[in-house]
Amino acid sequence: MIIKARIKEKPVREIFITTEFIRLDSALKLADAVQSGGHAKIIIQDGEVKVNGEVCTMRGKKLHPGDEIAVPFMKIVVREK
């Protein structure tokens, strides 16, 4: 028997900022990827968040337009408004 699996692509959400940068924890909240700042802190510290393809454990990491965030269930792209 052959079993074929299809991997579903993560939904992509864009967030728009009018400032030079946004902090990682704030970006996760803005994208509705977390329910609170405490939830953001936990998933960041647990290494579940990647910024531009690399695991990031700094919740205050400055993100600029063009940066990409990946969490287990979503991809987030920072855009300039």
Image (tube, grey):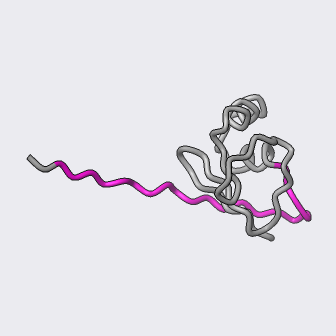
Toward the right, the furthest residue is: 20
Q: In this image, 20 relative to 55: left or right?
A: right
Q: Judge by depth and name the residue closer to the eye, 70 or 27.
A: 70
61 falls in the magenta region: no
Toward the left, the furthest residue is: 1
Q: In this image, 40 relative to 11: left or right?
A: right
Among the 4 quarters of the image, the one containing residue 69 = bottom right
Q: Judge by depth and name the residue closer to the eye, 77 or 55.
A: 55
* Segment colored magenta: 3-23
* Number of disc labels: 0
Among the 4 quarters of the image, the one containing residue 46 = top right
- Judge whether 45 appears above or below 5 on screen: above
Identify the residue at horizontal 80%, vertical 70% (top origin). 80
- Judge whether 77 appears above or below 32 on screen: below
Secondary structure that dominates the magenta span: loop
Image quadrant in which the C terminus is located: bottom right
Q: Judge by depth and name the residue closer to the eye, 29 or 75.
A: 75
- Name the spot of residue 55 as percent of width and height, x first: 68, 47
- Judge whether 16 appears above or below 7 on screen: below
- Name the spot of residue 33 as percent of width and height, x first: 64, 44
- Name the spot of residue 2 as percent of width and height, x first: 13, 50
